[in-house]
């Protein structure tokens, strides 16, 4: 009877974990070899653990995620230099993936590099974030968590958008709020429209501005109506994917001055797209190449080798 009692308690605990599990299953990797001779080695190992816990253990939505529903993502932080004691210039790469329904396969949702990331971190520094007070008491300390939180909300928004039309809107709004209230100070960049053509401001602008509204239908069509239907309705699914790509072309041709979202979405799509259309008829391949010449110019010659 006692063993049965403990079994019931354990089962209840496991079920509770599966119901209340946080949204992300993130790995955090810090590459610090460029500055290892200038910094206490404990600092970055501690930071790596704290950032991983910050991302994975915080509740970012009001929804319940089971363990298998948690979003697979990775944060790669490369420390470029020591600006001053405890202050670092870094590059941040953020990747998130989405499982495809009825397939042993994941598709890339986000593959983004952020080269304008300066932050402050010292041993035993708490990792805290308050979306109602994004700037914090110390701008460079706040820039660390504000940037990470921004990308968490972008990841959530893209994932929700891929499952339901405009489902990601609340999370894109939260990312936009971070941009509007971002830390300001010497060395901090990436939050303003004038900080270059590819930054956090421009990216979330592409995801929230009415002029780029078709991007949400594109995300839904490509993933939910396209990839998720491939196992059961392959021809209908391929048509949905092609239509999504053609809509990207229309969006790019209409305004590519501040267009950042389409190149980001196309990152890492070469193998996926050629796998879907390598056996398509000549008419579809011709249309596809015309479309890809607008939205994925960097890989156009590689596409031609397979699709022509």
Image (cartoon, rainbow, N blue to C red):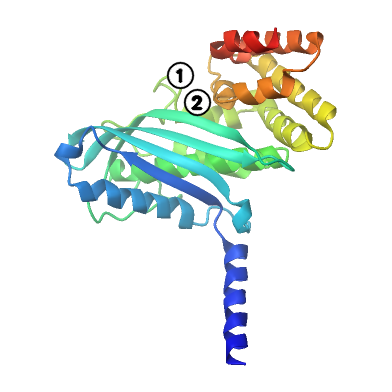
Judging depth in this view, the residue of 62 and 191 nearest the camera is: 62
Q: Which residue is mark 2?
A: 202
SS type, badge 2: helix
State the count of labels: 2
Q: What residue occupies the far bottom of the structure in this picture?
A: 1
Instruction: Looking at the picture, tell me which residue is in the foreground, 54 or 49.
Output: 49
Q: Quadrant of residue 299?
A: top right
Q: Quadrant of residue 268?
A: top right
Q: Is residue 295 above or below residue 147?
A: above
Q: Position of residue 198 (x, y in %)?
A: 46, 22
The quarter of the rendered structure image containing the N terminus is: bottom right
Residue at image position (34%, 45%) is 142
**Where, by quadrant of the figure, is residue 125 drawn?**
bottom left
Residue 130 in percent (x, y) is at: 42, 52
Residue position for label 1: 197
* For marks 2 and 1 on the same chain, the one whose residue lies earlier in the sequence: 1
Q: Are marks 2 and 1 in contact (CB under 8 Å)?
A: yes
Crowd around label 2: few <14 · some 14–19 · many ≥20 (10 Å): many
């Amino acid at each position: 009877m006692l063993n049965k009692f403990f079994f019931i308690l354990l089962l209840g605990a496991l079920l509770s974990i599966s119901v209340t599990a946080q949204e992300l299953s993130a790995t955090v990797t810090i590459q610090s070899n460029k500055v290892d001779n200038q910094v206490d080695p404990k600092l970055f190992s501690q930071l790596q653990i704290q950032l991983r816990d910050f991302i994975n253990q915080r509740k970012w939505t009001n929804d319940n995620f089971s363990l298998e529903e948690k979003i697979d993502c990775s944060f790669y932080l490369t420390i470029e230099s020591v600006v001053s004691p405890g202050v670092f210039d870094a590059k941040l790469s953020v990747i998130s993936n989405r499982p495809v329904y009825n397939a042993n396969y994941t598709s890339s949702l986000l593959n983004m590099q952020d080269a304008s990331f300066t932050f402050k971190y010292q041993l035993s520094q708490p990792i805290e974030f308050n979306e109602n007070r994004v700037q914090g008491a110390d701008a460079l300390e706040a820039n660390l968590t504000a940037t990470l939180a921004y990308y968490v909300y972008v990841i959530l928004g893209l994932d929700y958008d891929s499952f339901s039309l405009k489902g990601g809107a609340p999370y894109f709004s939260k990312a936009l709020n971070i941009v509007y209230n971002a830390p300001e100070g010497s060395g901090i960049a990436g939050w303003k429209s004038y900080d270059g053509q590819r930054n956090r401001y421009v990216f979330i602008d592409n995801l929230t501005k009415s002029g780029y509204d078709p991007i949400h239908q594109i995300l839904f069509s490509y993933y939910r109506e396209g990839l998720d239907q491939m196992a059961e309705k392959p021809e209908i699914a391929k048509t949905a994917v092609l239509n999504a790509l053609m809509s990207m072309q229309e969006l790019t041709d209409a305004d590519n001055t501040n267009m950042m979202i389409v190149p980001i979405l196309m990152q890492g799509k070469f193998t996926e797209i050629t796998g879907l259309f390598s056996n398509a008829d000549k008419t579809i391949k011709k249309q596809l190449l015309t479309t890809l010449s607008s939205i994925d110019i960097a890989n156009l010659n590689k596409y031609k080798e397979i699709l022509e």
